């Protein structure tokens, strides 16, 4: 079976999962983190080389301060707990997103996790926090100018090399849970030729079995990249 080298997931539906049970949204986010642990393990076992998980977008700051605060607190708690699981599986951690506007404590924890896992040789786990594709592209363009590139030197390779995903292969399989059919500003450039897999399952209900279904579906796809 052809295993996608890079799987990206828009983890959506935590709020609705909680609402269905009459619970506050944050309980959905807590359940969602447990899914992250399951999927990390399943993706690594399946031989995926890069797993990008969309945890918090640049647009998610629009949410009520109480929810944003709770999400940040949850993130901080789990960043500390992830280390053990990442070490066990030889997974490398990478923060995907802008540092500007992020709480300093979380940035420090993410840096620590990156350093502690830098020598792991297994799957790379890219956690998208404060991530927005348009922001990423705008900063890549700005960096081209700062690096003194002439107009003729600003091409696809020059931009790719200045994205937060520099050196990471393009997304092969893009999964979104919760029944929405949209990209919501995630890896727009990197997903130019990604195969899409949308499921109605809410993120806390997504499991290793469903990931396997998505991987099998992907293996059946015929990718053409504009050719014949
Ligand atoms: C996804 O779940 C997690 C984040 C965006 C942080 P949501 O919080 O978007 O859940 P729904 O879409 O409201 O159900
Ligand atoms: C996308 O989910 C962002 C994350 C999963 C982090 P949203 O719930 O924010 O997306 P929209 O608002 O439904 O497009
Ligand atoms: Mg949502």
Image (cartoon, rainbow, N blue to C red):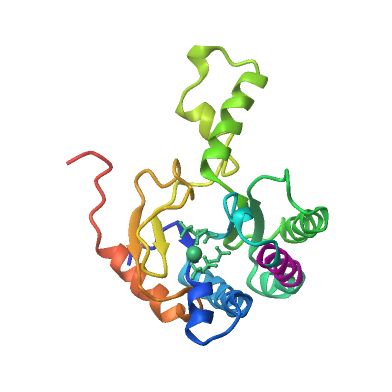
> Which residue ends up furthest to the bottom in the rendered image?
21
Of residues 101 and 81, which is closer to you in this image? 101
Q: Look at 64% across and 15% down and name the residue there.
A: 148
Q: Quadrant location of residue 69?
A: bottom right
On the image, which quarter does residue 110 sit in? Answer: bottom right
- The percent position of residue 126, horizontal first and vertical second, equals 59, 56
Quadrant for the C terminus, please: top left
- Residue 74 point in image, percent of width and height: 71, 71
Which of 98/222 is in front? 98
- Quadrant for residue 127, please give it: bottom right
Query: Magenta stretch: dominant SS?
Result: helix
Segment colored magenta: 67-79
In the rendered image, the quadrant that contains the N terminus is bottom left
Q: What residue lies at 70% left-to-right and 67% top-to-bottom?
A: 66
Q: Residue 161 or 104: which is nearer the viewer? A: 104
Residue 47 location (% of width, % of height)? 48, 66
Q: Is residue 141 magenta?
A: no
Residue at the farthest left position: 228
Q: Is residue 21 above or below residue 101?
A: below
Q: Is residue 84 left or right of residue 219?
A: right
């Amino acid at each position: 079976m052809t295993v996608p080298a890079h799987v990206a997931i828009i983890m959506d539906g935590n709020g609705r999962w909680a609402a269905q049970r009459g619970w506050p949204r944050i309980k959905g986010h807590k359940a969602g983190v447990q899914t992250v642990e399951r999927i990390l393990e399943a993706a690594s076992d399946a031989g995926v080389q890069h797993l990008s998980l969309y945890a918090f977008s640049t647009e998610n700051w629009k949410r009520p301060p109480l929810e944003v605060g709770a999400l940040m607190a949850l993130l901080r708690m789990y960043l500390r707990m992830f280390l053990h699981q990442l070490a066990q599986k030889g997974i490398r951690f990478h923060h995907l997103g802008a540092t500007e506007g992020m709480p300093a404590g979380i940035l420090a924890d993410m840096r620590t996790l990156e350093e502690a896992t830098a020598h792991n040789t297994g799957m790379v786990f890219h956690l998208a926090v404060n991530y927005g594709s348009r922001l990423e592209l705008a900063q890549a363009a700005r960096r081209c100018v700062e690096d003194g590139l002439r107009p003729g030197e600003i091409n696809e390779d020059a931009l790719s090399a200045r994205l937060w995903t520099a050196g990471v292969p393009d997304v092969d399989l893009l999964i979104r849970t919760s029944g929405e059919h949209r990209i919501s500003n995630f890896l727009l450039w990197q997903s130019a030729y990604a195969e899409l897999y949308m499921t109605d399952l809410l993120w806390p209900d997504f499991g290793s079995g469903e990931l396997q279904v998505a991987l099998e579906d992907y293996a059946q796809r015929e990718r053409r990249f504009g050719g014949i």
